[in-house]
Image (cartoon, grey):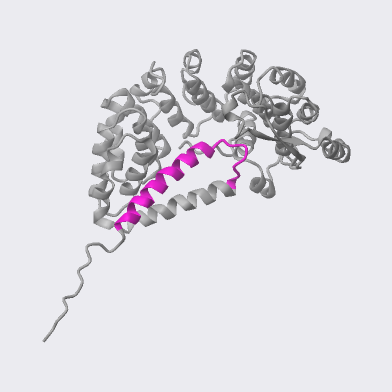
C-alpha cells in the first residue's frame, strides 16, 4: 500500500511575519514619540496610531514561546525603537521568563537604547519588573537609575524622597537628568509638594533638560514659570519661546509677537500660531503679504492653524541655490491674499473678541468635544498647561 506521510509544521505562524511586525512596531513607536507635541496630529490620529501599534503587538504574540529567540537581535541591538519593540512585546507576552530576559538586556544596555527599554518598562505591566527597577534606582549606574526612575514614575511607584533622585536630577550628563525629570512629570502633586532643584537645573546648558524641567514646573502649577519662560524667550531660548507663546497673558500678546517677529521662518509663524491670540491672527495676515515666498507660505499654514480656514493659492518653486537642485526644486504654496482678506472681513469681530484661537475654536476657557477632535495635540496640552497654571490640573501629555 502506498502511503503519504502527514506534513509536519515547524511553526503555527509565518516566521517572516514576526520580523515584519517587529519592524513595523518599532517604526510606529518612533512616529508616536515624534507626534506627541505636534500641532498637526489630533487626538483621533494618536488613537489610530496607538491602535496600529497594538495590532502589531498582537501579531507578535502569536509566536508564543518562540517569540523570545526571534526578537533576540532587536533586544540586544543598538536601535532605541527596536529595543522598545522587542522589550514591550516580551513584557506583554505570557511566558513569565520573558520579563527576566528583558531585565537582563536592560542591565546590559547603554546609550540611547536605554530610553527604549525605559519606554517599554514604563508602558508594560510592572508585575515582574518593579522590584528590579527599584534596585536599579537605588544601586544601578546613573543612566540605569534614571531609566528605572522614569518607568517607576509612570507606574506611580517612584518615591520623590528617594536619596538617589536629587542626584539624578542634577546629573551633569545631558542624557541622564532629563530622564529623571520626565519621571516626575508623571506624578501628581500640588505646588510645593516636594522641594525640587528647579533653579539649579535650569542653569544648565542642555535644551532637553530645560524642556524637561519646565514641563514638570508647568504641570505642577509652579507660579514662577511664566516669568522664567518670558526671560528665556527674551534670550532666544527655544524652550522659553514655546512656553511663553503657550502661557502668554492677553496684555502681553503684542510684546510677544514683537519678540517672535525677530525669529527665523518657520519658527516665527509657528510661535504666532501657538500664541493663538487675536493679535497673532492680524500679524499672520500681514506676513502673508510679505514678498518673501517662504514667509508668506509659512504664514498661510499658520493662518489655517489659527482659523481652520484654508487660503491655499499658487504653488511656486523656490530658487535653487545649487544648480544640482534645479531639477527637484522645493515647492511652497503661496496664500490667496484676496480670499484671506475676505475671511478676515467676515470673521474679524468674532476673532478679535476671542481669547486663544486654534483651528477656528476659541480655547481660552473651554475645550469642547468637537475641538478635541480637530485641534492638534500641542494645543490640547497647552490648554491643560494654562489650566494647571491657574490651579487646576486637568490632564498632562503622556510621559512616553
The x and y percentages for residue 126 are 34, 43
Tell me, yes or no, if residue 276 can be seen here: no
Instruction: Residue at 24% x, 54% y: name it.
Output: 66
In the visual, does 28 lie left or right of 248?
Answer: left
Asked whether 176 or 331 is in front, the reply is 331
Give the number of callouts. Answer: 0
Furthest residue toward left? 1
In the visual, does 104 lie left or right of 213?
Answer: left
Asked if residue 195 is positioned above or below residue 106 in the image, the reply reads above
For the N terminus, the image quarter is bottom left
Instruction: Residue at 70% x, 35% y: name it.
Output: 301
In the visual, does 120 lie left or right of 320?
Answer: left
Asked whether 50 or 182 is in front, the reply is 50
Instruction: Residue at 65% x, 21% y: name it.
Output: 264
The x and y percentages for residue 186 are 47, 35
Magenta span dominant secondary structure = helix
In the visual, does 178 lie left or right of 228?
Answer: left
Asked whether 110 or 198 is in front, the reply is 110
Furthest residue toward bottom? 1
Asked whether 76 or 227 is in front, the reply is 76
Tell me, yes or no, if residue 161 can be seen here: yes
Picture quarter containing residue 277? top right
Instruction: Indicate whether residue 41 is drawn in magenta.
Output: yes
Where does the magenta region start and end? 15-43
For the C terminus, the image quarter is top left
Instruction: Indicate whether residue 27 is drawn in magenta.
Output: yes
Picture quarter containing residue 136? top left
The x and y percentages for residue 399 are 47, 36
The x and y percentages for residue 36 are 53, 38
Picture quarter containing residue 356? top right
Amino acid at each position: 500500500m502506498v502511503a503519504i506521510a502527514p506534513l509536519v509544521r515547524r511553526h503555527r505562524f509565518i516566521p517572516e511575519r514576526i520580523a515584519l511586525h517587529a519592524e513595523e512596531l518599532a517604526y510606529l513607536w518612533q512616529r508616536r514619540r515624534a507626534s506627541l507635541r505636534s500641532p498637526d496630529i489630533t487626538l483621533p490620529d494618536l488613537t489610530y496610531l496607538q491602535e496600529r501599534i497594538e495590532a502589531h503587538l498582537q501579531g507578535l504574540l502569536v509566536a508564543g514561546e518562540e517569540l523570545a529567540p526571534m526578537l533576540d537581535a532587536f533586544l540586544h541591538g543598538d536601535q532605541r525603537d527596536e529595543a522598545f519593540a522587542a522589550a514591550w512585546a516580551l513584557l506583554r507576552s505570557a511566558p513569565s521568563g520573558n520579563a527576566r530576559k528583558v531585565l537582563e538586556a536592560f542591565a546590559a544596555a547603554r546609550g540611547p537604547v536605554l530610553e527604549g527599554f525605559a519606554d517599554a518598562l514604563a508602558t508594560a505591566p510592572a508585575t515582574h519588573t518593579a522590584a528590579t527597577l527599584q534596585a536599579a534606582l537605588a544601586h544601578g549606574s546613573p543612566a540605569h537609575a534614571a531609566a528605572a526612575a522614569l518607568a517607576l514614575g509612570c507606574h506611580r511607584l517612584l518615591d520623590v524622597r528617594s536619596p538617589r533622585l536629587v542626584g539624578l536630577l542634577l546629573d551633569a550628563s545631558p542624557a541622564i537628568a532629563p530622564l529623571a525629570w520626565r519621571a516626575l512629570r508623571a506624578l501628581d502633586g500640588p505646588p510645593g509638594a516636594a522641594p525640587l532643584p528647579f533653579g539649579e537645573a535650569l542653569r544648565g546648558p542642555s535644551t532637553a533638560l530645560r524642556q524637561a524641567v519646565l514641563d514638570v514646573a508647568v504641570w505642577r502649577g509652579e507660579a514662577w514659570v511664566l516669568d522664567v519662560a518670558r526671560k528665556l524667550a527674551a534670550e532666544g531660548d527655544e524652550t522659553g519661546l514655546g512656553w511663553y507663546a503657550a502661557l502668554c497673558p492677553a496684555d502681553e500678546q503684542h510684546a510677544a509677537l514683537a519678540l517672535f517677529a525677530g525669529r527665523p521662518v518657520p519658527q516665527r509663524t509657528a510661535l504666532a500660531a501657538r500664541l493663538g491670540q487675536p493679535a497673532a491672527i492680524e500679524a499672520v495676515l500681514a506676513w502673508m503679504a510679505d514678498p518673501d515666498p517662504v514667509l508668506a507660505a509659512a504664514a498661510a499654514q499658520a493662518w489655517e492653524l489659527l482659523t481652520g480656514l484654508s487660503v491655499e493659492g499658487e504653488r511656486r518653486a523656490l530658487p535653487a541655490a545649487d544648480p544640482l537642485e534645479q531639477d527637484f526644486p522645493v515647492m511652497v504654496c503661496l496664500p490667496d491674499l484676496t480670499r484671506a482678506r475676505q475671511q478676515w472681513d467676515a470673521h474679524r469681530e468674532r476673532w478679535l473678541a476671542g481669547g486663544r484661537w486654534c483651528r477656528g475654536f476659541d480655547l481660552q476657557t473651554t475645550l469642547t468635544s468637537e475641538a478635541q477632535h480637530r485641534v492638534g495635540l500641542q494645543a490640547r496640552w497647552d490648554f491643560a498647561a494654562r489650566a494647571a497654571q491657574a490651579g487646576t490640573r486637568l490632564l498632562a501629555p503622556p510621559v512616553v
